[in-house]
């Protein structure tokens, strides 16, 4: 799947006036320039990883997965369509640890699915990584 640079970001983030942020001004810059433009906080990283799932960007998902829990590869369910992300909570525990609770909705073979997870993130050398998550 591709996303138009000026189209709404797959993660659904809105600005102060509740207008959708364009992909290029939201997760797009983190996906496109991982080395130079790391996501600034755990919520931004979580959102960008959701967008990477939508775009099936395995390289970004692996690069933002902490090496201690990173799988050897990331697979994508054929035919799965992501429908939206709802970030419920962004809890900053300290300068280098944070949790993000979210609900991600998808559809597979006509069936609606819902992933409700509390993810843990860790920051190392100014860069946030996904560590692991608990399904709610
Ligand atoms: Zn986004």
Image (tube, rainbow, N blue to C red):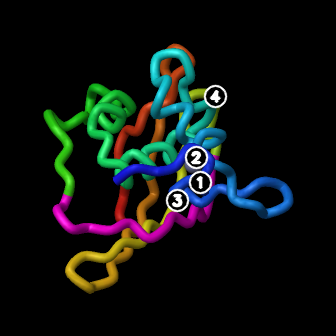
For this rendering, which residue is in front, 89 or 74? 74
Query: Are the residues flagged by discs 1 and 2 in contact, CB closer than 8 Å?
Result: yes
Sequence order check: which comes first, mark 4 or mark 3? 4
* Residue 8 screen position, x and y as percent: 60, 56
Sequence-wise first label, 2 or 4: 2
Q: In front: mark 1 or mark 3?
A: 1
Q: Is label 4 or label 1 in front?
A: 1
Q: Secondary structure at mark 3?
A: strand
Q: Which residue is mark 2?
A: 23
Foreground mark, 1 or 2, reads 1
Does the beta carbon at disc 3 come under 8 Å from ligand 1? no
Q: Which residue is mark 1?
A: 7
* Residue 78 part of the magenta segment: yes
- N-terminal label among 1 and 2: 1
- Establish whether ligand 1 lies closer than 8 Å to the Cβ of label 2: yes
Which structural element holds mark 1?
A: loop
Q: Which mark is residue 101?
A: 3
Q: Give the vertical position of 58 relative to 54 (above or below).
A: above
N-terminal label among 1 and 3 = 1
Q: How far separated are the C-alphas under marks 2 and 4?
A: 27 Å
**Which region of the structure is painted magenta?**
77-91
Looking at the image, tell me whether mark 2 or mark 3 is earlier in sequence order.
2
Task: Give the labeled residue for mark 4.
Answer: 95
Picture mark count: 4
């Amino acid at each position: 799947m591709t996303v138009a640079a000026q189209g709404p970001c797959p993660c659904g983030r809105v600005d102060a006036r509740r207008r959708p942020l364009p992909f290029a001004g939201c997760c797009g810059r983190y996906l496109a320039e991982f080395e130079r433009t790391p996501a600034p906080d755990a919520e931004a990283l979580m959102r960008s990883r959701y967008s990477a799932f939508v775009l099936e960007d395995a390289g970004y998902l692996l690069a933002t997965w902490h090496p201690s829990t990173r799988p050897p590869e990331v697979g994508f369910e054929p035919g799965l369509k992501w429908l939206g992300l709802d970030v419920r909570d962004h809890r900053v525990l300290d300068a280098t640890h944070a949790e993000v609770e979210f609900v991600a909705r998808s559809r597979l073979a006509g069936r609606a699915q819902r992933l409700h997870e509390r993810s843990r993130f860790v920051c190392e050398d100014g860069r946030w990584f996904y560590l692991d998550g608990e399904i709610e």
